[in-house]
Amino acid sequence: MTWQRDPGMPVPSWQGGDLHPGFRERESGRAGALLIGPKFSGAIQWAGRAWPGSDSPGGSAQLQAPWPSKQFLPVVVPVPGPVPLGLPAAPTATPTMGLELYLDLMSQPCRAVYIFAKKNGIPFELRTVELLKGQHYSDAFAQVNPLRKVPALKDGDFTLAESVAILLYLSRKYKTPDHWYPQDLQACARVDEYLSWQHTALRNCCIQVMWQKMMFPVFLGEPVPPETLAATLAELDRCLQLLEDKFLRNQAFLTGSHISVADLVAITELMHPVSAGCQVFESRPKLAAWRQRVEAAVGKDLFQEAHAVVLKAKDLPPADHAMKEKLRPLMQILLK
């Protein structure tokens, strides 16, 4: 595989940072790869199968900057048959897998991770793990996360569980804008404060409301005692008041004037009771205005994409007997 400039096309210099500083060629009978920087515009020409998708022997392409991602773009060209141009074949390297995210968008922390990665242009392979089918209990998934929970992350040989840990890992590795997880000591502490509180407060009551109000009676055909649901709704109302009084106060976002991972974690939680038909925002104008700001900061299309699955959960067909048995331990926990 040979990469060279196409002298017949006007191109900027390949110097000055247009190409990745570690630019390299790989020659083999199967593939070649070139790392192109986010500012590169110009033409590439090669011997072998043309990119993208052409069967012609050799080809070229005009690439226009800037790329959507801030990362360097790998252009990989498959080359069938013998090594082109008589170059000696190099040993085939074991391919390194990129970032993989194991998610089910029915899960609120999965939605937070999904929105964060998408919004920040982080390239990843989505590996869907369907919780309602019990796929998180499979031996294959246990190799990724022995805790058998989503979300989970796999970055090459490195694996990571727990949504907060994953969000912070992504923010640090991909150097996302500072407002997501600030460097300032006290601003960062405010984000940490919310992330520490929500686990045993807002998250608990949001998931209980969704299951008690919708999933148990509709999906599982299991009635919920009215007094149980009433107590859960009262706890949700108490948590919403704390969310307003302690965290949002008179700020634009939960921890200040800019959106942070705390806002993503919170809004994805609140969409759980919304999916069950709860009027979470209607009687709380301060929270309603905050939701609009979060949606605008994230992008309405991305927000709707991330929540499409959970907002259609009310239309799920009834679970079969085997599924009910799998979910029975969860029922015992969420009906306490």
Image (spheres, grey):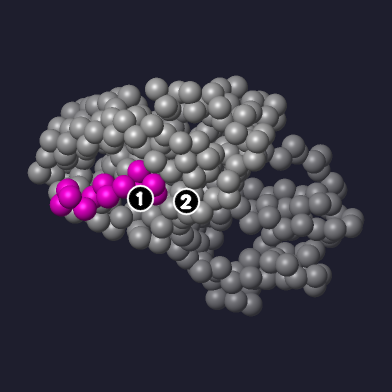
Q: Amino acid at mark 2?
A: Lys
> How many angstroms separate mark 1 from mark 2 (CA)?
9 Å
Q: Amino acid at mark 1?
A: Gly
- Helix, strand or loop at disc 2? helix
Q: Is residue 2 visible?
A: yes
Residue 20 image point, x, y percent? 53, 50
Residue 160 image point, x, y percent? 52, 28
Pick the front one: 302 or 180? 302
Q: Is residue 1 above or below residue 64?
A: above
Kindly identify the residue that appears in the image at 60 percent across and 34 percent down: 324
Left or right side of 72 for 79: right
Q: Which residue is mark 1?
A: 277
Q: Is residue 246 above or below residue 39?
A: above
Left or right side of 153 for 191: left
Residue furthest left in the image: 250
Kindly identify the residue that appears in the image at 67 percent across and 62 percent down: 4
Residue 333 image point, x, y percent? 45, 23
Look at the image and give the residue range highlighted in magenta. Answer: 273-285
Label pair 1/2, CB-CB below 8 angstroms? yes
